[in-house]
Amino acid sequence: IDPTRIAVMGHSAGGHLALWLAGCGRVPAESPIAAPALPLRAAVSLAGVVDLREAWRLRLSSGVVRELLGGEPEAVQDRYAAASPIELVPLGVQQLLIHGELDDIVPIALSERYVAAATTAGDDATLLALPDAEHFAVIDPESAAWPQMLAAVTSLFA
């Protein structure tokens, strides 16, 4: 396997995991979810939950973040710090976030905030905002958003 050609990609909660995987080497060693850094070329988040504190604050998916991390941010701050991609920047790999502006499941504001934080930290992070796309359009091969998503992801390897 050519490690210079490996990218990870995920949708929604999987978008969170793709960026977390790219930054897992930055998780503090004492954390139970600490892992060695992986040699990735890029990480792609499709409508991802990339800021777990904000997702908790917004009560996305009926508060599933609290369930995932076992508490509210004030109660388990170290878990949020270790699991939330926005808190791990800079990740040190190219990042592409693709998000529909009509997404009412995971607001595009999470991706906007993430890209701002990542670029401020020195990462190569880009947001492709799709004006007429909702949450599932980015993974639907029949949607109008699909060709834009596919072209953006393919360009990572150009």
Image (tube, rainbow, N blue to C red):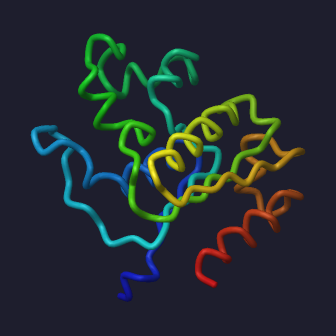
Q: Quadrant of residue 77?
A: top left
- Which residue is found at the position 80% from the left and 64% from the top? 148
**38, above or below 143, in the image:** below
Q: Left or right of 39: which side holds 56?
A: right
Q: Which residue sits furthest bottom? A: 2
On the image, the x and y values in percent for residue 57 come to 52, 15
On the image, the x and y values in percent for residue 15 come to 53, 49
On the image, the x and y values in percent for residue 79 come to 27, 28
Q: Quadrant of residue 72?
A: top left
Quadrant in the picture for the N terminus: bottom left
**117, above or below 14, in the image:** above
Q: Left or right of 132: which side holds 71?
A: left
Quadrant in the picture for the C terminus: bottom right
Q: Which residue sits furthest left? A: 30
On the image, the x and y values in percent for residue 115 come to 58, 45
**55, above or below 98, in the image:** above
- Which residue is found at the position 33% from the left and 28% from the top? 80
Q: Left or right of 41: which side holds 24?
A: left
Q: Left or right of 138: which side holds 60?
A: left
Q: Quadrant of residue 88?
A: top left
- Which residue is found at the position 59% from the left and 35% from the top? 113
Give the tally of numbered discs.
0
- Which residue is found at the position 76% from the left and 57% from the top? 140
